Amino acid sequence: MADADDVRRVALALPGTVEIDSEGFDFRVGNKGFVWSYPQREPGKPRVVRSDVAVLYVGDEAEKQALILGEPDLFFTVPSYDGLPLVMCRLPEVTVSRLEELITDAWDMRRPPE
């Protein structure tokens, strides 16, 4: 089981990572986001930042769908993220080692070329 502190520890250990001031967590590399808290929005209600759900950059729609279909208890999406290479991960359901892999992969895809 992982939490926001694990996200912060893993993300900040990666070179060039910057934490953006936010209600939850928001990490970028080369001005590109790679993991952040899920800003849940429901019509007619204020936005709620969910620090128990991480939004992760996954590269493309195929990878996103593979994660969601393969592990629906762990990964999900919402209509506002349709067509975007982003997936939501339920932090209490993911192991820390898997979270490290997911965050590192997201960072690697978003970092500037060397």
Image (spheres, grey):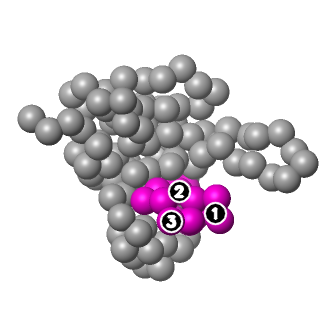
Q: Position of residue 76 (x, y in %)?
A: 56, 65
Asked if residue 75 lies in the magenta stretch, the reply is yes
**Element class at badge 1:** loop
Q: CA distance from mark 2 to mark 3?
A: 14 Å
Tell me residue 46's x, y (percent): 83, 39
Q: Are marks 2 and 3 in contact (CB under 8 Å)?
A: no
Tell me how far mark 2 sits from mark 1, CA to CA: 9 Å
Q: Secondary structure at mark 2?
A: strand
Q: Residue at x 50, y 65 (%)?
A: 83
- Do tag 2 and tag 1 residues touch (Cβ < 8 Å)? yes
Disc 3 crowd, CA 10 A, few/some/many (<14, 14-19, 20+)? few
- Residue 107 relative to residue 66: left or right: left
Report the span colored magenta.
Answer: 74-91
Q: In the image, which is nearer the foreground, mark 3 or mark 1? A: 3
The percent coordinates of residue 29 (x first, y second) are 31, 32
Q: Which residue lies under the disc numbered 2?
A: 88
Say which label, 3 or 1, has the lower sequence index: 1
Q: Secondary structure at mark 3?
A: loop
Q: Give the distance between the C-alpha atoms of the residues marked 3 and 1, in whole angstroms.
A: 10 Å
Determine which quarter of the picture holds residue 61: bottom left
Left or right: 14, with 41 as reference point: left
Q: Confirm whether residue 74 shows in the render.
A: no
Q: Is residue 74 above or below residue 47?
A: below
Would you name the residue on which mark 1 appears? 78
Task: Mark 1: give few (<14), some (14-19) or many (20+) Cα within 10 Å.
Answer: few
The amino acid type found where label 2 is placed reads: Met
Q: Is residue 108 magenta?
A: no
**109 and 69: which is toward the camera:** 109
Indicate the quadrant where residue 49 lies: top right
Please give the name of the residue rendered at 63% of the width and 63% of the height, measured from the top-left corner.
Answer: 78
Disc 3 + disc 1, Cβ < 8 Å: no
Q: Which residue is mark 3?
A: 83
